[in-house]
Image: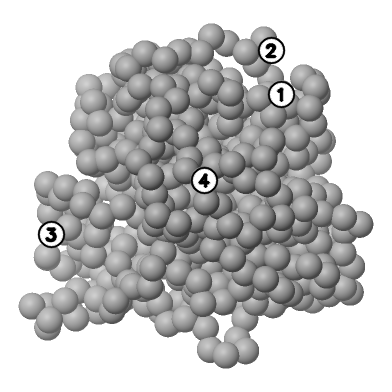
C-alpha cells in the first residue's frame, strides 16, 4: 500500500490522469494561453471531459527562515504572524486589531464513490496534511499597538469551533460563520477574550455531506444585513438536487432576527464577499466546476445582483450548457447571467478585498486583490498567487496583475494564499493556509494610513449604499423547507433559518 501511495503521488506530480486507482496519459491542454481567460470576455474552449482527469498536485514544503513570497519593487513583504494552523481568512476590526481564522474542514463526510476517496487523498497532499496536525478551528486576535507593522500581542479569542471561515463585527457583536451556522458572540473592541456563549443567528446548510464547507460573511453598508456564502454540495449535482437545498448561493440574513432569504443562486462555490466601499455593491469570487478539461471553467470575480441566477449547475458563463447535468433545464439556462470578470480556470479564488482607503502605492490603490489558492486538476499549475484587478467607476477596468508570487517553485509549494484583507495601517494581509503564516504587504516607502479602517465599512443610515434592488428589503422567511435551487428569490431557506435557537456551548 505504501508503495502504491508513492506511485500515485509521483503520478500526480508528473501531471498524468487518475481515475479510481488507474493511471493513463491524457491531452493536457498545456498549449492553451491562460491569459485569454482573464477579463470580461474569456476564451472558452470546447469541453474536454474524459473519464481520466488531469492531475498535478504540488507538495507542500513550507517556508525556510527568512524566506518570503515575492512582490513588486514598490512593495515590501514581511511575515505578520507565524506558527499558525491553516489560517484561512483575515478580518480587521475598527480599532485596527486583526482577527485571523484558523480552520480545517469538517471530518466524517461520507465517501460513496471512488472519486470521493481520490479527492480526499488529493486534498490532503494539496494542504500538506502529514503527521499529527496542530489544533485548529480557532479565531486569533493580532494586535499592532503602535502601528509599526509588527504584531505586539496575540490572543486566541475562540477555540474548538466547527470549521469557521467568515467574520463580521457590529454593535459589540462578533459574528462567526462556522460551517453549519452563523454564531453571534458579545464582543467589545479591545477585549482579549470571549467568555460568553453564542447564540445561533441562523443555521446554515452543513453535513453529513458538506462538499464546500467554507462559509464567508459580509456586513451590509447600512449594518442591517449579513451576507453569507454557501457553496454547492457537489461538482455538478452528482449527490442529487435534494443535497443542494439552500446551496450554491449567497444568503441575505437579517442581523436582528436571523430571518433569511437567497439573494443570488447558481454560484458553485462563492467566497471573498465584500461590498465596494464607494458604490455599496456586493462582490464575490467564485470557484467554478471541474472535469470539463484543464481550461474550463474559469473561476471569476463578479458583482452579485439581487435575485440573479448565475448558471450552476445547468450552464456556465451565461448560457454555455453543461450537457452532463440531467435532467436538462433550458429554462434555467436562459435565465443565467454571465459574471463580470474571469480569473482563468482552476485558480481556486478564495479571498477578495478592495484596496480603496489603503496606504498602498497608487498603482494598487483602487482595485481588488484576489487570493488564488491554486490548481490541482491541471497538468500545469495555475493560481498560487495574489493578483490585483484594477477598478474604475466601481467596475474592473483592466488586466489582472500578479502582486504576491513565489508560493510555488517547480513541483514544490511553500504555501497557498487564501483570504486577503487590509490591516489597521493600510497594508495588505494574506492568509497562507499551507505555509501557516499571515503575510503583510506594505508600501516600500513605509507610508501608513491616517487611522485604521475596518473590514466592515458601515455607514448607518446610508440607504443609498445598499445593493441595487434591495430597497425596500424583500420579505424574509422562517419556514423549515426550501424549494429547489432553481427557485432564485425570494427563496425560503432550510433547517429552521432564523430560529434564534441557542447553540451547544463551545469550548474557548
Q: Residue at 62% across / 50% down in the picture? A: 352
**266 over 58 or under it: above or below:** above
Query: Disc 2, disc 4: CB below 8 Å?
Result: no
Q: Position of residue 80 (x, y in %)?
A: 66, 73
What residue is disc 4 on? 196
SS class of the residue under badge 1? loop
SS class of the residue under badge 4? loop
What residue is disc 3 on? 20
Tell me the number on the disc at residue 471: 2
Residue 34 in sight in this render: no
Mark 1 or 3, nearer chain start: 3
Q: CA distance from mark 2 to mark 4?
A: 35 Å
Mark 4 or 3, nearer chain start: 3
Mark 2 or 4, nearer chain start: 4
SS class of the residue under badge 3? loop
Tell me the number on the disc at residue 466: 1
Amino acid at each position: 500500500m505504501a508503495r502504491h501511495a508513492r506511485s500515485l503521488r509521483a503520478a500526480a506530480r508528473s501531471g498524468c490522469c487518475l481515475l479510481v486507482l488507474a493511471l493513463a496519459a491524457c491531452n493536457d491542454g498545456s498549449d492553451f494561453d491562460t491569459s485569454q481567460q482573464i477579463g470580461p470576455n474569456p476564451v472558452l474552449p470546447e469541453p474536454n471531459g474524459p473519464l481520466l482527469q488531469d492531475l498535478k498536485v504540488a507538495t507542500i514544503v513550507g517556508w525556510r527562515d527568512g524566506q518570503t513570497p515575492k512582490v513588486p519593487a514598490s512593495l515590501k513583504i514581511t511575515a505578520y504572524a507565524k506558527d499558525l494552523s491553516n489560517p484561512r481568512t483575515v478580518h480587521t476590526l475598527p480599532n485596527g486589531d486583526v482577527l485571523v481564522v484558523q480552520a480545517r474542514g469538517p471530518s466524517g463526510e461520507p465517501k460513496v464513490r471512488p472519486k470521493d476517496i481520490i479527492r480526499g487523498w488529493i486534498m490532503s497532499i494539496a494542504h500538506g496534511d502529514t503527521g499529527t496536525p496542530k489544533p485548529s478551528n480557532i479565531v486569533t486576535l493580532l494586535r499592532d499597538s503602535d502601528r509599526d507593522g509588527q504584531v505586539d500581542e496575540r490572543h486566541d479569542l475562540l477555540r474548538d469551533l466547527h470549521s469557521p471561515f467568515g467574520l463580521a463585527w457590529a454593535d459589540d457583536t462578533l459574528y462567526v460563520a462556522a460551517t453549519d451556522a452563523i454564531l453571534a458572540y458579545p464582543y467589545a473592541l479591545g477585549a482579549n477574550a470571549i467568555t460568553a456563549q453564542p447564540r445561533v443567528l441562523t443555521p446554515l446548510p452543513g453535513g453529513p455531506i458538506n462538499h464546500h464547507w467554507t462559509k464567508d460573511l459580509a456586513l451590509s453598508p447600512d449594518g442591517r444585513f449579513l451576507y453569507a456564502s454557501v457553496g454547492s454540495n457537489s461538482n455538478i449535482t452528482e449527490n442529487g438536487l435534494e443535497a443542494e437545498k439552500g446551496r450554491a448561493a449567497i444568503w441575505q440574513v437579517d442581523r436582528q432576527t436571523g430571518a433569511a432569504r437567497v439573494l443570488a443562486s447558481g454560484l458553485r462555490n462563492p467566497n471573498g464577499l465584500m461590498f465596494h466601499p464607494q458604490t455599496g455593491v456586493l462582490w464575490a469570487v467564485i470557484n467554478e466546476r471541474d472535469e470539463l478539461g484543464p481550461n474550463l471553467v474559469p473561476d471569476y470575480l463578479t458583482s452579485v445582483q439581487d435575485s440573479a441566477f448565475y448558471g450552476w449547475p445547468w450552464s456556465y458563463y451565461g448560457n454555455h450548457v453543461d450537457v452532463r447535468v440531467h435532467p436538462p433545464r433550458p429554462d434555467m439556462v436562459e435565465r443565467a447571467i454571465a459574471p463580470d470578470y474571469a480569473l482563468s480556470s482552476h485558480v481556486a479564488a478564495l479571498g477578495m478585498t478592495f484596496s480603496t482607503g489603503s496606504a498602498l502605492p497608487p498603482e494598487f490603490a483602487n482595485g481588488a486583490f484576489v487570493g488564488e489558492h491554486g490548481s490541482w486538476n491541471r497538468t500545469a499549475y495555475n493560481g498560487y498567487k495574489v493578483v490585483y484587478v484594477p477598478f474604475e467607476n466601481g467596475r474592473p477596468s483592466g488586466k489582472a496583475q500578479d502582486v504576491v508570487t513565489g508560493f510555488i517553485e517547480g513541483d514544490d509549494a511553500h504555501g497557498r494564499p487564501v483570504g486577503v484583507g487590509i490591516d489597521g495601517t493600510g497594508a495588505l494581509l494574506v492568509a497562507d493556509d499551507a505555509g501557516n503564516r499571515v503575510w503583510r504587504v506594505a508600501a516600500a516607502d513605509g507610508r501608513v494610513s491616517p487611522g485604521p479602517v475596518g473590514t466592515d465599512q458601515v455607514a448607518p443610515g446610508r440607504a443609498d449604499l445598499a445593493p441595487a434592488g434591495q430597497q425596500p428589503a424583500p420579505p424574509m422567511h422562517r419556514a423549515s423547507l426550501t424549494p429547489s435551487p432553481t427557485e432564485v428569490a425570494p427563496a425560503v431557506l432550510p433547517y429552521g433559518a432564523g430560529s434564534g435557537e441557542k447553540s451547544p456551548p463551545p469550548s474557548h
